[in-house]
Image (tube, helix red, strand yellow):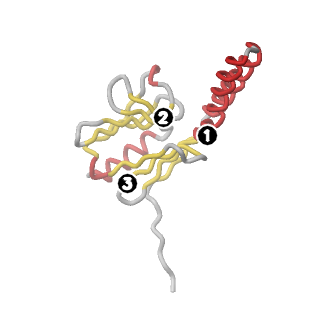
Amino acid sequence: MTTATATPDYTHTQKAPLCLILYGSALAGWSLAWMIGDTAGLYIGGGVGLLIVLLAPCFHHLTLADQGEVLAIRFGPVPLFRRTVRYAEIEKVEIGRTFLLDGWGIHLSMRGGWVWNLWGRACVVVRFKNGGTLRIGTDDAENLAGFLEGKIS
């Protein structure tokens, strides 16, 4: 007897050097703490460097995957930061670009709504029925937007 497993209609993983920038920042923090030399500087610089080193593995890649009724958005390989978007809650999808000041990571956009971006400025702007906005940064914006359009039609 064979069982069919459902394969996702869309899966994409974007890799980027953001984690290398974070590791370099941690090294700079430790170097600065060592150069300052006093106890407070060692604790502050060393602590900030340690925090960055612990968070950097969360930002090696960004994976977007269809999971039936939701789109899963996961930074990784350490899956500390993740969220899902229910297709039923999406009103409109469009291809866009983030502002240069929006940068990378997870944060509120200057235009309103959330930004989840690993690298680059291309994004898919998801507008929700409740008025919220999510900008998903991706190097595959056309395919993601087309997939989401198909899900909300």
Q: Position of residue 9 (x, y in %)?
A: 43, 58
Residue labelled with disc 2: 117
Point out the residue furthest to the front here: 39
Q: Residues within 10 Å of mark 2 (few under 14, many from 20)?
A: many
Q: Secondary structure at mark 2?
A: strand
First reached walking from the N terminus: tag 1 or tag 3: 1
Q: Residues within 10 Å of mark 1 (few under 14, many from 20)?
A: some
Q: Position of residue 131 (x, y in %)?
A: 24, 37
What's the amino acid at mark 1? His
Q: Is residue 111 above or below residue 94?
A: above
What's the amino acid at mark 3? Val
Q: To which quarter of the image does residue 132 belong?
A: top left
Q: Is residue 93 above or below residue 5?
A: above
Residue labelled with disc 1: 60
Q: Is residue 109 above or below residue 137?
A: above
Q: Residues within 10 Å of mark 3 (few under 14, many from 20)?
A: some
Residue labelled with disc 3: 70
First reached walking from the N terminus: tag 2 or tag 3: 3
Point out the residue furthest to the left here: 130
Q: Secondary structure at mark 3?
A: strand
Closer-to-camera residue (43/135): 43
**Looking at the image, which residue is at 27% across and 52% down?**
88
What's the amino acid at mark 2? Asn
